[in-house]
Protein backbone atom coordinates (compact mmCIF):
# COMPACT_ATOMS: atom_id res chain seq x y z
CA UNK A 1 0.00 0.00 0.00
CA UNK A 2 1.45 3.36 -1.03
CA UNK A 3 1.64 6.01 1.68
CA UNK A 4 0.15 9.21 0.35
CA UNK A 5 1.38 12.69 1.31
CA UNK A 6 -0.92 15.61 1.97
CA UNK A 7 -1.84 18.18 -0.69
CA UNK A 8 0.46 20.70 1.01
CA UNK A 9 3.33 18.23 0.97
CA UNK A 10 2.79 17.33 -2.70
CA UNK A 11 2.58 21.03 -3.59
CA UNK A 12 5.81 21.77 -1.72
CA UNK A 13 7.51 18.82 -3.38
CA UNK A 14 6.39 20.07 -6.81
CA UNK A 15 7.97 23.47 -6.10
CA UNK A 16 11.23 21.89 -4.99
CA UNK A 17 11.79 19.73 -8.10
CA UNK A 18 14.82 20.32 -10.26
CA UNK A 19 13.28 19.67 -13.68
CA UNK A 20 15.30 17.91 -16.39
CA UNK A 21 15.03 19.92 -19.62
CA UNK A 22 17.65 18.62 -22.03
CA UNK A 23 17.65 15.60 -24.27
CA UNK A 24 19.54 12.60 -22.91
CA UNK A 25 21.93 11.16 -25.47
CA UNK A 26 24.99 8.95 -25.03
CA UNK A 27 24.84 9.11 -21.26
CA UNK A 28 24.51 12.86 -20.80
CA UNK A 29 21.99 15.65 -20.96
CA UNK A 30 22.39 17.87 -24.04
CA UNK A 31 20.45 20.78 -25.47
CA UNK A 32 19.08 20.41 -28.98
CA UNK A 33 21.84 21.01 -31.54
CA UNK A 34 19.78 23.92 -32.89
CA UNK A 35 19.52 25.37 -29.38
CA UNK A 36 15.74 25.51 -29.77
CA UNK A 37 13.34 24.77 -26.92
CA UNK A 38 9.63 24.40 -26.38
CA UNK A 39 7.52 25.17 -23.34
CA UNK A 40 6.02 22.45 -21.23
CA UNK A 41 3.21 23.62 -18.98
CA UNK A 42 1.24 22.31 -16.06
CA UNK A 43 -2.15 21.75 -17.73
CA UNK A 44 -4.00 22.17 -14.44
CA UNK A 45 -2.74 25.73 -13.95
CA UNK A 46 -1.44 26.78 -17.36
CA UNK A 47 1.83 27.76 -15.65
CA UNK A 48 5.05 27.15 -17.52
CA UNK A 49 7.12 24.37 -16.01
CA UNK A 50 10.21 24.44 -18.19
CA UNK A 51 11.74 25.02 -21.61
CA UNK A 52 12.58 21.60 -22.99
CA UNK A 53 15.04 20.84 -25.81
CA UNK A 54 13.20 20.96 -29.15
CA UNK A 55 15.21 18.35 -31.00
CA UNK A 56 15.16 17.81 -34.74
CA UNK A 57 16.44 15.26 -37.28
CA UNK A 58 20.09 16.10 -36.51
CA UNK A 59 19.59 15.13 -32.88
CA UNK A 60 17.79 11.98 -33.95
CA UNK A 61 20.73 11.06 -36.21
CA UNK A 62 23.16 11.63 -33.36
CA UNK A 63 21.11 9.58 -30.90
CA UNK A 64 20.66 6.72 -33.37
CA UNK A 65 24.42 6.71 -34.12
CA UNK A 66 25.22 6.50 -30.41
CA UNK A 67 22.62 3.79 -29.89
CA UNK A 68 24.12 1.87 -32.82
CA UNK A 69 27.66 2.16 -31.40
CA UNK A 70 26.42 0.87 -28.07
CA UNK A 71 24.58 -2.01 -29.67
CA UNK A 72 27.42 -3.12 -31.94
CA UNK A 73 30.24 -2.97 -29.41
CA UNK A 74 28.19 -5.14 -27.10
CA UNK A 75 28.57 -3.01 -23.95
CA UNK A 76 24.97 -3.98 -23.15
CA UNK A 77 23.74 -6.28 -25.90
CA UNK A 78 26.42 -8.90 -25.27
CA UNK A 79 26.37 -8.90 -21.48
CA UNK A 80 25.14 -12.04 -19.79
CA UNK A 81 21.37 -11.58 -19.33
CA UNK A 82 21.95 -11.88 -15.59
CA UNK A 83 24.26 -8.84 -15.72
CA UNK A 84 21.63 -6.83 -17.54
CA UNK A 85 19.16 -7.96 -14.92
CA UNK A 86 21.36 -6.65 -12.10
CA UNK A 87 21.59 -3.17 -13.65
CA UNK A 88 17.84 -3.03 -14.30
CA UNK A 89 17.15 -4.10 -10.73
CA UNK A 90 19.38 -1.26 -9.51
CA UNK A 91 17.23 1.08 -11.57
CA UNK A 92 14.16 -0.44 -9.93
CA UNK A 93 15.63 0.33 -6.49
CA UNK A 94 16.30 3.93 -7.48
CA UNK A 95 12.77 4.33 -8.80
CA UNK A 96 11.42 2.87 -5.57
CA UNK A 97 13.43 5.41 -3.57
CA UNK A 98 12.16 8.30 -5.70
CA UNK A 99 8.48 7.39 -5.87
CA UNK A 100 6.94 10.57 -4.39
CA UNK A 101 9.12 12.79 -6.58
CA UNK A 102 8.22 10.80 -9.72
CA UNK A 103 4.52 10.84 -8.86
CA UNK A 104 4.56 14.62 -8.52
CA UNK A 105 6.62 15.12 -11.67
CA UNK A 106 4.20 12.97 -13.64
CA UNK A 107 1.21 14.76 -12.17
CA UNK A 108 2.32 18.35 -12.81
CA UNK A 109 3.43 17.59 -16.38
CA UNK A 110 0.30 15.65 -17.40
CA UNK A 111 -2.57 16.80 -15.18
CA UNK A 112 -3.06 13.27 -13.84
CA UNK A 113 -4.20 13.00 -10.22
CA UNK A 114 -1.19 12.49 -7.99
CA UNK A 115 -3.27 9.77 -6.34
CA UNK A 116 -3.22 7.75 -9.58
CA UNK A 117 0.46 8.45 -10.14
CA UNK A 118 1.39 7.41 -6.60
CA UNK A 119 -0.84 4.35 -6.34
CA UNK A 120 -0.84 3.04 -9.91
CA UNK A 121 1.46 4.58 -12.52
CA UNK A 122 4.71 4.61 -10.55
CA UNK A 123 4.23 1.26 -8.73
CA UNK A 124 3.23 -0.41 -12.01
CA UNK A 125 6.21 1.16 -13.80
CA UNK A 126 8.50 -0.30 -11.16
CA UNK A 127 6.76 -3.68 -11.22
CA UNK A 128 6.97 -3.83 -15.02
CA UNK A 129 10.71 -3.11 -15.11
CA UNK A 130 11.33 -5.59 -12.33
CA UNK A 131 9.25 -8.29 -14.04
CA UNK A 132 11.16 -8.05 -17.32
CA UNK A 133 14.52 -7.83 -15.54
CA UNK A 134 13.70 -10.94 -13.53
CA UNK A 135 12.48 -12.74 -16.64
CA UNK A 136 15.43 -12.23 -18.91
CA UNK A 137 17.84 -14.74 -17.39
CA UNK A 138 15.15 -17.44 -17.35
CA UNK A 139 14.24 -17.65 -21.03
CA UNK A 140 15.72 -20.57 -22.94
CA UNK A 141 16.34 -20.86 -26.66
CA UNK A 142 15.30 -23.96 -28.58
CA UNK A 143 16.79 -26.95 -30.34
CA UNK A 144 14.72 -28.08 -33.31
CA UNK A 145 14.01 -31.79 -33.88
CA UNK A 146 16.80 -33.23 -36.01
CA UNK A 147 18.58 -36.38 -37.16
CA UNK A 148 22.00 -37.42 -35.89
CA UNK A 149 23.69 -35.60 -38.75
CA UNK A 150 22.95 -32.07 -37.60
CA UNK A 151 21.81 -29.86 -34.77
CA UNK A 152 19.46 -26.97 -35.47
CA UNK A 153 19.45 -24.20 -32.87
CA UNK A 154 16.63 -21.68 -32.84
CA UNK A 155 17.88 -18.64 -30.96
CA UNK A 156 16.44 -15.25 -30.21
CA UNK A 157 18.67 -12.23 -30.75
CA UNK A 158 18.06 -8.63 -29.76
CA UNK A 159 16.65 -6.78 -32.74
CA UNK A 160 19.17 -3.91 -32.46
CA UNK A 161 18.43 -0.20 -32.30
CA UNK A 162 14.83 0.44 -31.37
CA UNK A 163 12.77 3.62 -31.60
CA UNK A 164 10.10 4.00 -28.93
CA UNK A 165 7.46 6.63 -29.59
CA UNK A 166 5.33 7.34 -26.56
CA UNK A 167 1.96 8.88 -25.72
CA UNK A 168 1.20 11.39 -22.97
CA UNK A 169 -1.51 9.51 -21.10
CA UNK A 170 0.73 7.16 -19.08
CA UNK A 171 4.17 8.64 -19.74
CA UNK A 172 6.29 6.54 -17.38
CA UNK A 173 4.20 3.40 -17.54
CA UNK A 174 4.23 3.25 -21.35
CA UNK A 175 7.96 3.90 -21.22
CA UNK A 176 8.30 0.93 -18.89
CA UNK A 177 6.09 -1.30 -21.05
CA UNK A 178 8.56 -0.71 -23.86
CA UNK A 179 12.01 -0.29 -22.29
CA UNK A 180 11.35 -3.17 -19.86
CA UNK A 181 11.50 -5.89 -22.51
CA UNK A 182 13.70 -3.92 -24.96
CA UNK A 183 16.54 -3.26 -22.52
CA UNK A 184 16.24 -6.69 -20.93
CA UNK A 185 16.63 -8.23 -24.40
CA UNK A 186 19.80 -6.20 -25.02
CA UNK A 187 18.51 -3.61 -27.47
CA UNK A 188 19.67 0.01 -27.50
CA UNK A 189 16.76 2.43 -27.52
CA UNK A 190 15.97 5.93 -28.68
CA UNK A 191 12.88 7.14 -26.85
CA UNK A 192 10.69 9.94 -28.13
CA UNK A 193 8.34 10.98 -25.32
CA UNK A 194 5.18 12.92 -26.15
CA UNK A 195 6.03 16.64 -26.21
CA UNK A 196 3.37 17.27 -23.54
CA UNK A 197 5.06 14.93 -21.05
CA UNK A 198 8.83 14.59 -21.46
CA UNK A 199 9.94 15.26 -17.90
CA UNK A 200 9.47 11.92 -16.17
CA UNK A 201 11.11 10.06 -19.05
CA UNK A 202 14.17 12.30 -18.77
CA UNK A 203 14.31 11.73 -15.03
CA UNK A 204 14.13 7.98 -15.49
CA UNK A 205 17.01 8.15 -17.97
CA UNK A 206 19.05 9.99 -15.37
CA UNK A 207 18.29 7.30 -12.78
CA UNK A 208 19.17 4.59 -15.31
CA UNK A 209 22.60 6.15 -15.76
CA UNK A 210 23.02 6.24 -11.98
CA UNK A 211 22.08 2.55 -11.92
CA UNK A 212 24.95 1.77 -14.30
CA UNK A 213 23.23 1.50 -17.66
CA UNK A 214 26.03 2.11 -20.18
CA UNK A 215 26.03 5.32 -22.22
CA UNK A 216 24.18 5.14 -25.53
CA UNK A 217 21.85 2.33 -24.49
CA UNK A 218 18.94 4.54 -23.39
CA UNK A 219 18.60 7.83 -25.24
CA UNK A 220 15.73 10.29 -24.92
CA UNK A 221 15.13 12.76 -27.75
CA UNK A 222 12.53 15.36 -26.86
CA UNK A 223 10.46 17.31 -29.34
CA UNK A 224 7.55 17.17 -31.71
CA UNK A 225 6.16 14.32 -33.77
CA UNK A 226 7.20 16.01 -37.00
CA UNK A 227 10.76 16.85 -35.93
CA UNK A 228 11.60 13.76 -33.87
CA UNK A 229 8.93 11.07 -34.33
CA UNK A 230 8.94 11.10 -38.09
CA UNK A 231 12.75 11.11 -38.55
CA UNK A 232 12.95 8.24 -36.09
CA UNK A 233 10.28 6.34 -38.01
CA UNK A 234 12.09 6.99 -41.29
CA UNK A 235 15.61 6.42 -40.00
CA UNK A 236 17.53 3.87 -42.08
CA UNK A 237 19.54 2.65 -39.09
CA UNK A 238 16.62 2.02 -36.73
CA UNK A 239 15.73 -1.66 -36.76
CA UNK A 240 12.33 -1.51 -35.15
CA UNK A 241 9.79 1.00 -33.84
CA UNK A 242 7.28 0.42 -31.09
CA UNK A 243 4.60 3.10 -30.92
CA UNK A 244 1.66 3.87 -28.66
CA UNK A 245 -0.74 6.61 -29.63
CA UNK A 246 -3.48 7.46 -32.06
CA UNK A 247 -4.44 5.23 -34.97
CA UNK A 248 -3.84 8.11 -37.40
CA UNK A 249 -0.23 8.54 -36.31
CA UNK A 250 0.32 4.78 -35.98
CA UNK A 251 -0.68 4.38 -39.61
CA UNK A 252 2.04 6.85 -40.59
CA UNK A 253 4.71 4.59 -39.11
CA UNK A 254 3.82 1.89 -41.61
CA UNK A 255 4.48 4.41 -44.41
CA UNK A 256 7.74 5.50 -42.79
CA UNK A 257 8.87 1.90 -42.62
CA UNK A 258 7.83 1.07 -46.18
CA UNK A 259 9.56 4.21 -47.47
CA UNK A 260 12.80 3.56 -45.58
CA UNK A 261 14.37 0.29 -44.45
CA UNK A 262 11.30 -1.89 -43.77
CA UNK A 263 11.96 -1.67 -40.07
CA UNK A 264 9.61 -3.72 -37.96
CA UNK A 265 6.70 -1.72 -36.58
CA UNK A 266 4.56 -2.49 -33.56
CA UNK A 267 1.56 -0.25 -33.03
CA UNK A 268 -0.63 0.05 -29.95
CA UNK A 269 -3.40 2.47 -30.82
CA UNK A 270 -6.84 3.73 -30.03
CA UNK A 271 -10.03 2.13 -28.82
CA UNK A 272 -13.78 2.65 -28.53
CA UNK A 273 -14.15 -0.08 -26.02
CA UNK A 274 -17.50 -1.68 -25.22
CA UNK A 275 -18.67 -2.58 -21.76
CA UNK A 276 -21.64 -4.94 -21.99
CA UNK A 277 -23.99 -5.30 -19.04
CA UNK A 278 -26.67 -7.98 -19.47
CA UNK A 279 -29.94 -8.25 -17.55
CA UNK A 280 -28.61 -11.12 -15.46
CA UNK A 281 -25.54 -9.21 -14.18
CA UNK A 282 -25.20 -9.66 -10.43
CA UNK A 283 -24.60 -6.96 -7.85
CA UNK A 284 -25.28 -3.86 -9.91
CA UNK A 285 -23.54 -1.66 -7.40
CA UNK A 286 -20.23 -3.41 -8.04
CA UNK A 287 -20.92 -3.41 -11.78
CA UNK A 288 -21.53 0.34 -11.65
CA UNK A 289 -18.24 0.88 -9.81
CA UNK A 290 -16.43 -1.00 -12.61
CA UNK A 291 -18.30 0.95 -15.29
CA UNK A 292 -17.28 4.25 -13.71
CA UNK A 293 -13.69 3.16 -13.24
CA UNK A 294 -13.54 1.89 -16.82
CA UNK A 295 -14.88 5.12 -18.25
CA UNK A 296 -13.34 7.77 -16.01
CA UNK A 297 -10.04 6.40 -14.71
CA UNK A 298 -7.25 8.71 -15.92
CA UNK A 299 -9.97 11.16 -17.08
CA UNK A 300 -10.85 8.67 -19.80
CA UNK A 301 -7.45 9.45 -21.37
CA UNK A 302 -6.89 5.77 -21.78
CA UNK A 303 -6.77 3.64 -24.89
CA UNK A 304 -8.65 0.88 -23.07
CA UNK A 305 -11.26 3.22 -21.55
CA UNK A 306 -14.66 1.53 -21.53
CA UNK A 307 -16.29 4.43 -23.35
CA UNK A 308 -19.39 2.64 -24.69
CA UNK A 309 -21.76 1.15 -22.13
CA UNK A 310 -23.97 -1.37 -23.94
CA UNK A 311 -26.71 -2.23 -21.51
CA UNK A 312 -29.66 -4.56 -21.80
CA UNK A 313 -33.10 -2.94 -21.39
CA UNK A 314 -34.16 -4.75 -18.22
CA UNK A 315 -31.30 -3.39 -16.15
CA UNK A 316 -30.63 -0.02 -17.76
CA UNK A 317 -32.57 2.33 -15.45
CA UNK A 318 -31.25 0.78 -12.25
CA UNK A 319 -27.69 0.60 -13.52
CA UNK A 320 -27.62 4.21 -14.69
CA UNK A 321 -28.83 5.36 -11.29
CA UNK A 322 -25.93 3.54 -9.67
CA UNK A 323 -23.44 4.70 -12.29
CA UNK A 324 -24.47 8.30 -11.63
CA UNK A 325 -24.09 7.76 -7.88
CA UNK A 326 -20.58 6.32 -8.29
CA UNK A 327 -19.55 9.03 -10.74
CA UNK A 328 -20.52 11.68 -8.17
CA UNK A 329 -17.90 10.14 -5.87
CA UNK A 330 -15.09 11.06 -8.26
CA UNK A 331 -13.91 14.51 -7.14
CA UNK A 332 -12.79 16.83 -9.92
CA UNK A 333 -10.00 19.15 -8.89
CA UNK A 334 -6.36 19.97 -8.24
CA UNK A 335 -4.28 16.99 -9.38
CA UNK A 336 -1.92 17.52 -6.43
CA UNK A 337 -4.75 16.99 -3.96
CA UNK A 338 -4.65 13.27 -3.10
CA UNK A 339 -8.48 13.32 -2.85
CA UNK A 340 -8.82 14.25 -6.53
CA UNK A 341 -9.80 11.50 -8.95
CA UNK A 342 -10.42 13.66 -12.05
CA UNK A 343 -7.47 15.90 -12.82
CA UNK A 344 -6.86 18.23 -15.73
CA UNK A 345 -6.88 17.06 -19.33
CA UNK A 346 -3.37 16.90 -20.69
CA UNK A 347 -3.31 20.12 -22.73
CA UNK A 348 -5.47 23.01 -23.84
CA UNK A 349 -5.70 21.47 -27.32
CA UNK A 350 -6.89 18.17 -25.93
CA UNK A 351 -9.28 19.90 -23.53
CA UNK A 352 -10.81 21.76 -26.50
CA UNK A 353 -11.26 18.48 -28.37
CA UNK A 354 -12.91 16.71 -25.43
CA UNK A 355 -15.06 19.67 -24.36
CA UNK A 356 -16.11 20.00 -27.99
CA UNK A 357 -17.88 16.64 -27.74
CA UNK A 358 -20.13 18.06 -25.01
CA UNK A 359 -21.60 20.16 -27.79
CA UNK A 360 -22.29 17.12 -29.93
CA UNK A 361 -24.82 15.39 -27.68
CA UNK A 362 -27.58 16.10 -30.21
CA UNK A 363 -30.43 13.63 -29.69
CA UNK A 364 -28.61 12.14 -26.72
CA UNK A 365 -29.60 12.77 -23.10
CA UNK A 366 -27.06 13.80 -20.46
CA UNK A 367 -27.52 11.61 -17.37
CA UNK A 368 -24.81 13.27 -15.31
CA UNK A 369 -21.95 15.69 -15.84
CA UNK A 370 -21.38 17.85 -18.88
CA UNK A 371 -19.44 20.55 -17.02
CA UNK A 372 -16.18 21.93 -18.34
CA UNK A 373 -14.09 24.72 -16.81
CA UNK A 374 -11.23 25.32 -19.23
CA UNK A 375 -8.94 22.60 -17.87
CA UNK A 376 -11.17 19.84 -16.47
CA UNK A 377 -14.23 18.00 -17.81
CA UNK A 378 -16.48 16.38 -15.23
CA UNK A 379 -17.45 12.69 -15.50
CA UNK A 380 -20.22 12.72 -18.08
CA UNK A 381 -22.72 10.01 -18.97
CA UNK A 382 -24.84 10.43 -22.10
CA UNK A 383 -27.61 8.12 -23.28
CA UNK A 384 -27.47 8.05 -27.06
CA UNK A 385 -30.03 6.75 -29.56
CA UNK A 386 -27.70 4.19 -31.14
CA UNK A 387 -24.19 3.13 -32.02
CA UNK A 388 -24.11 5.43 -35.08
CA UNK A 389 -24.02 8.50 -32.85
CA UNK A 390 -20.76 10.45 -33.05
CA UNK A 391 -20.11 9.86 -29.32
CA UNK A 392 -20.13 6.12 -29.96
CA UNK A 393 -17.98 6.20 -33.08
CA UNK A 394 -15.08 8.53 -32.30
CA UNK A 395 -12.36 8.06 -29.72
CA UNK A 396 -12.94 11.00 -27.39
CA UNK A 397 -10.15 10.20 -24.93
CA UNK A 398 -11.92 12.09 -22.18
CA UNK A 399 -14.41 11.39 -19.37
CA UNK A 400 -17.49 10.98 -21.56
CA UNK A 401 -19.36 7.69 -21.44
CA UNK A 402 -21.98 6.85 -24.08
CA UNK A 403 -24.84 4.55 -23.14
CA UNK A 404 -26.49 2.38 -25.78
CA UNK A 405 -29.53 0.28 -24.91
CA UNK A 406 -29.88 -3.18 -26.46
CA UNK A 407 -32.53 -5.88 -26.28
CA UNK A 408 -30.51 -9.08 -26.27
CA UNK A 409 -27.14 -10.73 -25.81
CA UNK A 410 -26.78 -11.14 -29.58
CA UNK A 411 -27.51 -7.47 -30.20
CA UNK A 412 -25.02 -6.49 -27.51
CA UNK A 413 -22.25 -8.45 -29.22
CA UNK A 414 -23.16 -7.04 -32.61
CA UNK A 415 -23.04 -3.46 -31.31
CA UNK A 416 -19.81 -4.16 -29.40
CA UNK A 417 -18.14 -5.30 -32.61
CA UNK A 418 -19.57 -2.46 -34.70
CA UNK A 419 -16.43 -0.32 -34.51
CA UNK A 420 -13.14 0.01 -36.38
CA UNK A 421 -11.32 -0.58 -33.11
CA UNK A 422 -10.69 -3.76 -31.14
CA UNK A 423 -8.52 -3.05 -28.14
CA UNK A 424 -10.48 -4.04 -25.04
CA UNK A 425 -13.96 -4.99 -23.89
CA UNK A 426 -15.80 -6.15 -20.81
CA UNK A 427 -18.91 -8.19 -20.24
CA UNK A 428 -20.97 -8.43 -17.06
CA UNK A 429 -23.29 -11.41 -16.68
CA UNK A 430 -23.95 -14.18 -14.18
CA UNK A 431 -24.39 -16.67 -17.02
CA UNK A 432 -21.03 -18.43 -17.40
CA UNK A 433 -21.79 -19.75 -20.86
CA UNK A 434 -22.73 -16.31 -22.14
CA UNK A 435 -19.66 -14.81 -20.51
CA UNK A 436 -17.34 -17.23 -22.28
CA UNK A 437 -19.21 -17.15 -25.58
CA UNK A 438 -19.28 -13.36 -25.42
CA UNK A 439 -15.56 -13.16 -24.64
CA UNK A 440 -14.89 -15.34 -27.68
CA UNK A 441 -17.22 -13.43 -30.00
CA UNK A 442 -15.95 -9.94 -29.17
CA UNK A 443 -13.16 -8.89 -31.50
CA UNK A 444 -10.75 -7.32 -29.03
CA UNK A 445 -7.27 -8.04 -27.69
CA UNK A 446 -8.41 -8.13 -24.05
CA UNK A 447 -11.87 -9.08 -22.77
CA UNK A 448 -12.57 -8.93 -19.06
CA UNK A 449 -15.50 -10.75 -17.50
CA UNK A 450 -17.37 -9.20 -14.57
CA UNK A 451 -14.68 -6.56 -14.14
CA UNK A 452 -12.94 -3.73 -15.95
CA UNK A 453 -9.20 -4.01 -16.45
CA UNK A 454 -6.27 -4.60 -18.74
CA UNK A 455 -5.02 -7.84 -17.22
CA UNK A 456 -1.61 -7.43 -15.62
CA UNK A 457 2.06 -7.56 -16.51
CA UNK A 458 1.83 -11.30 -17.20
CA UNK A 459 -0.86 -10.94 -19.89
CA UNK A 460 -0.33 -9.57 -23.40
CA UNK A 461 -1.88 -6.20 -24.20
CA UNK A 462 -2.70 -5.02 -27.71
CA UNK A 463 -5.46 -4.69 -30.19
CA UNK A 464 -7.41 -6.31 -32.97
CA UNK A 465 -8.46 -4.37 -36.07
CA UNK A 466 -7.32 -0.72 -36.11
CA UNK A 467 -6.26 -0.82 -32.46
CA UNK A 468 -3.10 -2.79 -32.93
CA UNK A 469 -0.50 -4.09 -35.31
CA UNK A 470 2.55 -6.26 -35.15
CA UNK A 471 2.87 -7.40 -31.56
CA UNK A 472 1.89 -7.05 -27.96
CA UNK A 473 3.08 -5.10 -24.93
CA UNK A 474 3.40 -6.81 -21.56
CA UNK A 475 3.98 -10.48 -20.75
CA UNK A 476 6.63 -12.76 -22.15
CA UNK A 477 5.15 -12.07 -25.60
CA UNK A 478 6.44 -8.49 -25.43
CA UNK A 479 9.92 -9.93 -25.91
CA UNK A 480 8.94 -11.05 -29.40
CA UNK A 481 8.90 -7.37 -30.46
CA UNK A 482 12.48 -6.75 -29.42
CA UNK A 483 14.07 -9.98 -30.58
CA UNK A 484 14.26 -11.86 -33.83
CA UNK A 485 14.60 -15.55 -34.48
CA UNK A 486 17.77 -16.99 -35.92
CA UNK A 487 18.31 -20.55 -37.06
CA UNK A 488 21.81 -21.92 -36.59
CA UNK A 489 22.15 -25.13 -38.57
CA UNK A 490 25.16 -27.22 -37.57
CA UNK A 491 26.15 -30.09 -39.79
CA UNK A 492 27.65 -32.99 -37.86
CA UNK A 493 28.23 -35.42 -40.69
CA UNK A 494 31.78 -36.53 -41.51
CA UNK A 495 31.24 -35.63 -45.19
CA UNK A 496 30.40 -32.05 -44.35
CA UNK A 497 33.54 -31.76 -42.24
CA UNK A 498 35.62 -33.05 -45.16
CA UNK A 499 33.97 -30.55 -47.49
CA UNK A 500 34.94 -27.67 -45.22
CA UNK A 501 38.55 -28.90 -45.06
N1 LIG B 1 -3.80 4.76 -27.69
C1 LIG B 1 -3.32 5.65 -26.88
O1 LIG B 1 -2.82 5.31 -25.87
C2 LIG B 1 -3.37 7.09 -27.21
C3 LIG B 1 -4.30 7.61 -28.07
N2 LIG B 1 -4.32 8.93 -28.33
C4 LIG B 1 -5.39 9.45 -29.22
O2 LIG B 1 -4.81 10.32 -30.15
C5 LIG B 1 -5.45 11.57 -30.09
C6 LIG B 1 -4.44 12.64 -30.43
O3 LIG B 1 -3.41 12.70 -29.45
P1 LIG B 1 -1.92 12.94 -29.91
O4 LIG B 1 -1.09 13.29 -28.75
O5 LIG B 1 -1.92 13.90 -31.05
O6 LIG B 1 -1.51 11.47 -30.38
P2 LIG B 1 -0.40 11.01 -31.37
O7 LIG B 1 -0.67 9.62 -31.77
O8 LIG B 1 -0.25 11.98 -32.48
O9 LIG B 1 0.94 11.07 -30.48
C7 LIG B 1 1.60 9.93 -29.97
C8 LIG B 1 3.10 10.10 -30.19
O10 LIG B 1 3.37 10.18 -31.59
C9 LIG B 1 4.11 11.36 -31.88
N3 LIG B 1 3.75 11.86 -33.19
C10 LIG B 1 2.77 12.73 -33.50
N4 LIG B 1 2.73 12.94 -34.82
C11 LIG B 1 3.70 12.22 -35.36
C12 LIG B 1 4.16 12.01 -36.69
N5 LIG B 1 3.60 12.64 -37.73
N6 LIG B 1 5.18 11.15 -36.91
C13 LIG B 1 5.75 10.52 -35.87
N7 LIG B 1 5.39 10.68 -34.60
C14 LIG B 1 4.36 11.51 -34.34
C15 LIG B 1 3.73 12.31 -30.77
O11 LIG B 1 4.68 13.36 -30.63
C16 LIG B 1 3.68 11.36 -29.58
O12 LIG B 1 4.97 11.10 -29.09
C17 LIG B 1 -6.02 11.65 -28.69
O13 LIG B 1 -7.06 12.52 -28.60
C18 LIG B 1 -6.43 10.23 -28.49
O14 LIG B 1 -7.66 10.02 -29.08
C19 LIG B 1 -3.40 9.76 -27.79
C20 LIG B 1 -2.43 9.31 -26.93
C21 LIG B 1 -2.39 7.94 -26.53
N1 LIG C 1 -3.87 1.91 -20.79
C1 LIG C 1 -2.54 1.71 -21.21
C2 LIG C 1 -2.31 1.87 -22.67
C3 LIG C 1 -2.71 3.19 -23.22
O1 LIG C 1 -3.59 3.86 -22.74
O2 LIG C 1 -2.11 3.58 -24.22
Image (spheres, helix red, strand yellow):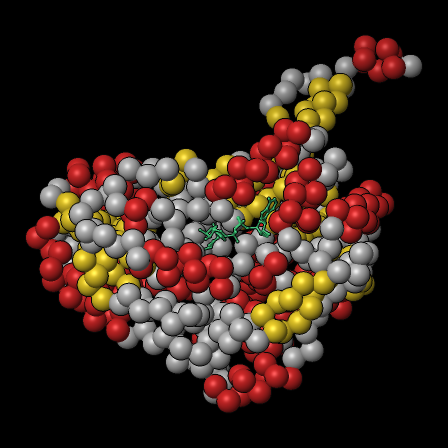
Which residue shows up at 23% across the image and 52% down it?
A: 362
Is residue 89 rendered to the left or right of residue 299?
right
* Foreground residue among 197 and 446: 197
Out of 144 and 350, give the one closest to the viewer.
350
Vertically, is 154 above or below 105? above
Determine which quarter of the picture holds residue 148. top right
Q: Residue 360's spot in the image, x, y percent?
A: 29, 53
Q: Is residue 431 left or right of residue 446?
A: left
The tally of labels here is 0
Residue sitting at the far left: 314
Which quarter of the figure is the C terminus placed in?
Answer: top right
Residue at left 53%, top 83%? Answer: 10
| Residue 281 locus on image (x, y percent) | 16, 55
**Which residue in the rendered view is the most extreme toward the right?**
501
- Residue at the location (42% across, 70% down)? 374
Which quadrant of the figure contains the N terminus? bottom left
> Does 444 sit left or right of 14 as displayed?
left
x then y, percent, for residue 166: 58, 53
Q: Please tell me in which quadrant of the rendered image residue 381 appears.
A: bottom left
Q: Residue furthest bottom?
A: 8
Residue 342 in view in this figure: no
Residue 196 location, x and y as percent?
58, 61
| Residue at 53% over, 48% down | 244
Q: Is residue 71 above or below residue 258?
A: below
Q: Is residue 281 visible?
A: yes
Amino acid sequence: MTDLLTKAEYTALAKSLDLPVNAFIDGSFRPAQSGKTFETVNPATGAKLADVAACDPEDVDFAVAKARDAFEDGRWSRLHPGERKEVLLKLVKLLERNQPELAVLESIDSGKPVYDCATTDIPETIHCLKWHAELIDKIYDQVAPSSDSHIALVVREAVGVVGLVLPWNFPLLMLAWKIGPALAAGCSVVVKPAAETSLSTLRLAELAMEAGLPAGVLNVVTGSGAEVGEPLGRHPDVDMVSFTGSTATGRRFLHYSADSNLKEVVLEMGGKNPCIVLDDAENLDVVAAHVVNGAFWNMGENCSAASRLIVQSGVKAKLLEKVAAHAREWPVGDPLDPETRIGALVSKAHYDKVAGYLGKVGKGKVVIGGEANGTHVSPTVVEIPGNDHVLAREEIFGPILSVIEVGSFEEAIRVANDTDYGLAASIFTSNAKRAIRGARMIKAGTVTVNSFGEGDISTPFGGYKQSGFGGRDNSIHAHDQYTQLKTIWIDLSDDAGDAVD
